[in-house]
Image: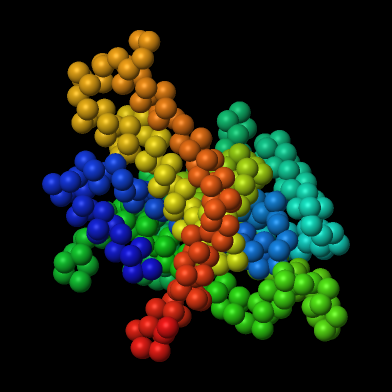
Amino acid sequence: MLALAAYPGIYSVLVNSPMSSEMVALLPRVETMIVVFYFGLFAMSFDFISGYTGYLSFGHTAFYGAGAYFVILAANGKIPLLAPDTSFVYLLVLGGLLAVVLAILIGAVSFRLTGVYFAMITLGFAQVLYVFVREWDYLASNPSDGPAVLERTDPFSIGVPGIDSLNLAIGQLAGDSVEGLLGVLSFNQAEVSYYMIGLVVLICYFAMQRIVHSPFGKVLVAIRENEERAKAVGYATFWYKLGAFAVSAFFAAVAGGLFAGFQRSVSPENTFYFLVTGDALLASIIGGFGTLAGPLYGWLFDETVTEFLSKAGQGGGLLPYLREHLGDATMATELYNGLTVGQAIDTFLNGHAELYIGAIFVLFVLFVPNGLLGTVRDKLGGPVGEQIAARLRGDGK
């Protein structure tokens, strides 16, 4: 967390250092890290239900999309009884509660099934909602375009509702900048969004972490390990699973609301579509199932590799770096049968990030089944925070 808190400053120092071109190529931008935060929260909510109960919710986008659309529609004045200027923090909570109701309705049916049948029925529910949202013109700002776009010009703000001085605006197109905080610190718009969205994600993470380590969370782990034994000792596992589903839906909707607040528009394809859940699954496997924080680091890994390999001509990444440093003569050098170095770079690097991510995913499944955080925990003998604290106290192994 300290490294994430210091990241914008570290990034700024490194990209203005003598090694700026290398750092720009290697390090994800602050804007990319904002995406890591809110989608990482969605991946953590997916891990909360799938990693701790063993029930793969392939339709988790239903809640992500519900939170995103609720925020945009409420801000556009399309939700009855809600004023368009309702606090963004309130909208996140209300969107989460809407997702809880939706989760109870879906879970009441879905948890009658287990295994692949549960995964498929949740996927089916999400696809029904995807088609419904895509075809309902009321949900789109412009029915011919499809996406629901924020119509008001002022950005959303995160902070204490009702106290303007304790709110800071976020957004991809508009947001607050802070000058001279504590007399020395200054933050641009992207950095303000980074810290405010990161704050919400941190609070949500601590809330889920507290639930996981509560007696309720222990029962969820028991269900994952052996549901029949959990039933035999007297636990009503259906209600525990339904409760976990509702909790995960709440935080998935908060993530969707953060996405909508930052991007200022949503569409069925980037919220309700089933492949969005596939990205959360990928992040969970790379980061570590059943670790809660692992999916955040898994998505950070994914986004870092994607940005490193997919930049076609602007910003950072490997491709612009090679074009800049190899020189025209090297780029024009023929390698084989008329194929030049420049053409080879374009062929194998430009736009093929997903190919390499897929290969990395396969390698993780085969050789790092516990994911990044899970493997580190195995090496240390327990949760990272606990083990580091124990070693600092001198009572670790």
For the point 37% across and 41% down, which residue is it? 308
Query: In the rendered view of the protein, which quadrant contains the C terminus?
Result: bottom left
Which is nearer the eye, 323 or 179? 323
Residue 89 percent location from the top left of the image: 50, 64
For the point 38% across and 83% down, which residue is it? 391
**Residue extending furthest toward the left:** 18
* Up/down of 88 relative to 366, above or below: below
Which is nearer the eye, 23 or 335? 335
Residue 92 percent location from the top left of the image: 55, 62
What colour scheme was applied to this rendering of the protein? rainbow
Which is nearer the eye, 219 or 190? 219
Residue 14 in sight = yes
Query: In the rendered view of the protein, which quadrant contains the N terminus?
Result: bottom left
Q: Quadrant of residue 266?
A: top right
For the image, the number of numbered tags is 0
* Up/down of 265 relative to 38, above or below: above
- Judge left or right: residue 112 versus residue 68: right
* Up/down of 63 relative to 229, above or below: above
Which is nearer the eye, 388 or 184? 388
Residue 65 percent location from the top left of the image: 62, 50
For the point 40% across and 89% down, which residue is it? 395
Residue 283 percent location from the top left of the image: 54, 53
**Residue extending furthest toward the top:** 338
For the point 31% across and 48% down, which residue is it? 27
Residue 296 in sight = no
